[in-house]
Amino acid sequence: MGDAQRRYGGLAADSLGTDGDRPPLVLLHGLTYDRSQWGPTLGALATLDPDRRVLALDLPGHGGSPARDAYGARDVTDVIHEAVTDAGLDRPVMVGHSLGGAMATIYAARYPSRGVVNVDQPLTLGPFGGFLRRNEPVLRSPEYLRVWGSLLDGMGIDGLPPAAQELVRTATTPRQDLLLGYWNDILVTTDEAFTEQRRRDLERIRSLGIPYHYVTGRDPSPAYRAWLESALPDVTVDVLPGGGGHFPHLADPAALARIIAGIGTDSAGAR
């Protein structure tokens, strides 16, 4: 699969493959990372589904993409849509890890899409919202990396293969402006309002018949699974056998590639 590093809608990107009868894929990485995190998945996909059209983007402020004054979810998904449009993609399958999973979900609720693959991004805040708000003074101080480090400790990085561990630990830029910017929606919104907005996004996706996969390396809690299925009864929950904590796409990229290759290849989700 050939590739070319380009810019679409102002965002740095790897543009792979050629247009064909299979829906194109758009890959969105997690907070503080960049499109290089998709390398193992793209390698597996190249074997499974050669020459599939793929656009792997650096989110605003990440990798080679320019910073912005604000990183609200609607603004960021608008920029992503500019890149999708500039690349000439028609109703892509949106694939995102962590923050990227949230952006893929919000994108599909707002713009034409043929599927969503959300890799380990719960759409309710749970304890996370309270944790961020309690630590907001630290996040705004020179000690902000203490907050980021405490989150990394719970992501299961030590269970990844050595090369994947290296990628997670080195290909990251935990800048203060990114953490505060992308988490601002959480800091200024109540848990109830935040969760209700995500529910509306899922109900919109349901109404459009867009296939939705929630991919994780560990079984979701019964409470979260019940919430997810109440908003989106047809959701597919994929627990990858390789585990990988918060990074199942790096623990078992071949399994994720199989999921991605299969979603959105029929008429479901066309609009």
Image: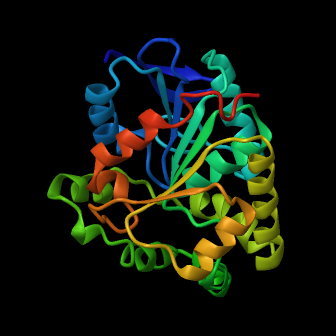
Q: Does residue 76 show up? A: no
Q: x, y (%) of residue 250?
A: 30, 52
User: Does 145 appear above or below 244?
Assistant: below
Q: How is the image coloured?
A: rainbow
Q: In the visual, does 44 lie left or right of 82?
A: left
Q: Front-most of 97 and 233?
A: 233
Q: Front-most of 111 and 83?
A: 111
Task: State which quadrant residue 107 falls in.
Answer: top right
What is the number of callouts on the image?
0
Q: Residue at x 64, y 26 (%)?
A: 83
Task: State which quadrant residue 110 falls in.
Answer: top right
Q: x, y (%) of residue 262?
A: 45, 35
User: Does 161 appear above or below 16?
Assistant: below
Q: In the visual, does 224 lie left or right of 72?
A: left
Q: Residue at x 65, y 58 (%)?
A: 182
Q: Does residue 142 show up? A: yes
In the picture, the quarter occupied by the C terminus is top right
Q: Front-most of 72 and 264?
A: 264
User: Does 165 appear above or below 2?
Assistant: below
In the picture, the quarter occupied by the N terminus is top left
Q: Front-most of 138 and 40?
A: 40
Q: Which residue is drawn at 36% across and 78% down?
A: 153
